[in-house]
Image: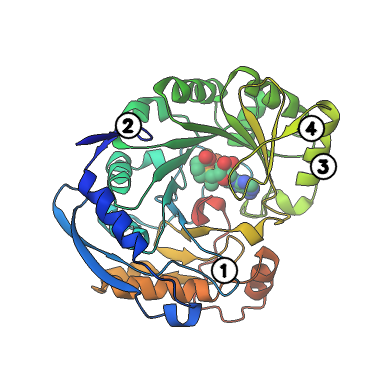
Amino acid sequence: MELDDCRGIRRWPIVKDIDERRLRGCAVLSNDKAMSEKVSLAQASEKGSDGTLATARRYAPLQDTFGRTFDYVRIAITEKCNLRCTYCMPEEGVDFKNGEQILTADEILRTINVLAGMGVKKVRFTGGEPLVRKDIVKLVEGAANTPGIKSVHLTTNGIIFPKYAQQLRDAGLTGVNISLDTFDPKKFKDITRRDGEEKVLAAIRHAIEVGFPRVKVNAVIMRGFNDGEMKLFTELTKDMPVTVRFIEFMPFDAHQIWETGEYFLSAESMIKYLKETYPDIELASGTRTEHHIFQVPGYAGKIAIIPAFTRSLCGNCSRIRLTADGGIRNCLYSDQEYSLRDLLRQGCTDDDIVATFRKAFHEKARDGFESKKRSASKVSTIKFEGRVSMTQIGG
Ligand SMILES: C[S@@+](CC[C@H](N)C(=O)[O-])C[C@H]1O[C@@H](n2cnc3c(N)ncnc32)[C@H](O)[C@@H]1O
Ligand code: SF4
């Protein structure tokens, strides 16, 4: 056994070796061919998530017709949540799917295993609030032990995070994004319809103490509501080694406030504000969809600006989205879905799963604007679930 420093979890050396050998032998097919073909049928016996021997296969990477490669899957594991953020859900919630409609842990882990065979390296569990799901530790452990998966992340509102933090770390969680939109208790209650900003701050501190390699803070910036706190958020990075992500408000709030147009603040305006407030702020590096990353000289953490609505980073997209009820979405702005759940429950083969992902990504539009246009005109819509909230899509 050897210790994997990055995750602090124990892996089997043989798995790594097999993985690398297979990677070297893996050719890339053109998209059309890749629709139905596997590149290499090299198979090997590996330890599965439950420690038993499992057969893993290597397929061609998942690509679209614009040459983008998709190696990051974001999986919503529940639609339910212990908060009711105004920019996400109404007070009474949304039309939640019943338990049977939601993917089981085994279905999720099987999907991750197949995706890892297609070159997916990064998994994020989100929701809804992923920590309200009882089997979250099992899911993280299973994903972290899947050969080929290099990092497992979680997006949470932080309210009950400290209770699970150590278990999640031990299970192999590498990164956590904790959502906090304001430091003001009254505003916190206005936005989430619950108390708890102290709990969320404590969760951020706890995540650092437990030693997660990547801790990020998600803040949806709304004009006239919390844009005045951007400086406070930036100051959080003075001593804390976190990346604060200022996210543009998107129209997935179950038709509550986005449409008023009052609250939207563009990424461009946020960058302008940062540059004016911190004239010596520097560009720093980040992930592909966090192209706009800054650091105040001497500060421990960073600031990322996420143009979630203005969609200027679609060319860098590497994301696969899976909804809690098993819908594959090739873009946040697309309402075109491919039901993996039905397929899984019909007793499909791994090759069938691969073919469904290929079909979904073969049909991916150039960018989020094109996706939205196609969705509105219902061009080639296969199935539309009428999702109106981020909790139903998986943020
Ligand atoms: C849907 S939540 C799910 C995970 C968890 N419940 C949380 O809040 O972190 C994921 C992220 O989406 C963000 N989000 C939700 N609705 C949004 C919207 N309409 N526009 C922009 N971001 C949104 C949340 O702030 C959060 O950071
Ligand atoms: S943003 Fe997250 S915490 Fe807020 S209501 Fe939506 S799912 Fe819950």
Residue 391 lies, with reference to residue 380, above or below; the image says above
* N-terminal-most mark, 2 or 4: 2
Residue that extends furthest to the top in the rendered view of this protein: 239
Compare residues 379 and 132 and report the one nearer the observer: 379
User: What residue sits right under mark 1 in the picture?
Assistant: 335
Disc number at residue 367?
A: none
Task: State the CA–CA distance, disc 2 to disc 4.
Answer: 36 Å
Residue visible at 43% across and 66% down in the picture: 61
* N-terminal-most mark, 3 or 2: 2
Residue visible at 55% across and 66% down in the picture: 386
Q: Which amino acid does label 1 sit on?
A: Asp
| Left or right of residue 224: residue 384 | left
Q: In which quarter of the image is ligand 1?
A: top right
Query: Tag 2: Cα neighbours inside 10 Å, few (<14), some, or many (≥20)?
Result: some
User: What residue sits right under mark 4 in the picture?
Assistant: 274
Task: State the CA–CA distance, disc 1 to disc 4.
Answer: 34 Å
Task: State the CA–CA distance, disc 3 to disc 2.
Answer: 40 Å
Query: Tag 1: Cα neighbours inside 10 Å, few (<14), some, or many (≥20)?
Result: many
Task: State the CA–CA distance, disc 3 to disc 1.
Answer: 29 Å
Q: In which image quadrant can residue 379 be found?
A: bottom right
Residue 113, horizontal then vertical, whole percent: 30, 58
